[in-house]
Image (cartoon, grey):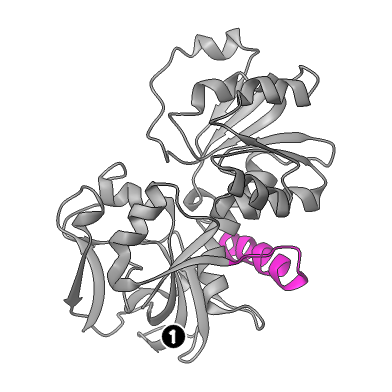
Amino acid sequence: MTRAIRIHETGGPEVLQCETVALEAPGPGEARVRHRAIGVNFIDTYHRSGLYPLPSLPHGIGTEAAGVVESVGPGVESPKPGERVAYASVAPGSYAEARNLPADRLVPIPEGISDEVAASALLKGMTVEYLVQRTHRVEPTETVLLHAAAGGVGLIACQWLKQIGATVIGTVSTEAKADLAREYGCDHPIIHSREDFVARVRELTGGEGVPVVYDSVGKATFAKSLDCLRPRGLYVGFGNASGKPEPFDMGLLAKKGSLFLTRPTLFDHIRTRPELLASARAVFDRLQAGHLKVEVQQRWPLSEAAACHRALEARQTRGSSILVP
């Protein structure tokens, strides 16, 4: 038996219930992981609300955690019991004390990286890796626009982009978040409630616009983000924190300068084990080298997952948050 957060219906944070559930022995190809830290990501709220439908109800929530392997099923040679591992972008269910997982989706945690950092950095870090190195390979001379620059993904992206040598324009919601984003490498934080970010982006780029916009906010920022792009620029929508953008006429992309638009996901970039290991290694290597600083800014007990979601959706969090089993 193990404690786990599950939902029996979609809705607000109140639908998150802490329950005791059965946990069978690991099956063929599986490993049981005892969680030590559970990462919290905005996609968790999409599963809870029904924006991203789960396959059935009741169902677990959460896609990222770190811990230790307790046991393995038939045919599993790696990892071995006692090894520290982390995972991200698997079937929801990480909000639990322990769970069984496909062994080939687990990655080893290197020495010197804590369970808390691994649980709060892996999904966000791999997201940044594919966004800035594969969706659009950012060059040192480029200026990019990054929404939610003080969030968990945003702070990692600011550091990664600065290491590349890019100039980062980032939108934030408060003065405190502007200071935080600046500390992590954002060159030009814009408080979107006080300033028109389109006008500011045009000013900072001499009227040209940016080659790429990274947007995890969605509905509230989509239309104006297109106005920030230079001709043949790329809009990358990788989240819907404010809801899904409204449908639009594709002719608008031509009118605004032959723009490109994509909606990528992490899972499609780590489909194979070699892809998964390469992306995770890129994140862990930067953490070990000191090129990335990931600090857990908020912690909640597992049983208080609802309070965590309320804070996350109200944009009251900064950086990374975790649940503690």
- Magenta stretch in the rendered image: 274-295
Question: Can see residue 90?
Answer: yes
Q: Residues within 10 Å of mark 1 (few under 14, many from 20)?
A: many
Residue closer to the observer: 20 or 92:
20
What residue is at 61 percent from the left and 18 percent from the top? Answer: 227
Quadrant that contains the C terminus = bottom left
Up the image or down, 270 lies above or below 53; here it is below
What residue is at 67 percent from the left and 49 percent from the top? Answer: 179
Q: Where residue 152 sits in the image (x, y, percent)?
A: 55, 55
Q: Where residue 173 sits in the image (x, y, percent)?
A: 54, 40
Direction from residue 210 to residue 194 in the image, left or right: left
What residue is at 36 percent from the left and 62 percent from the top? Answer: 62
The residue identified by callout 1 is 69
Residue closer to the observer: 263 or 167:
167
Direction from residue 252 to residue 278 in the image, left or right: right
Give the structural element (helix, strand or loop) at label 1.
strand
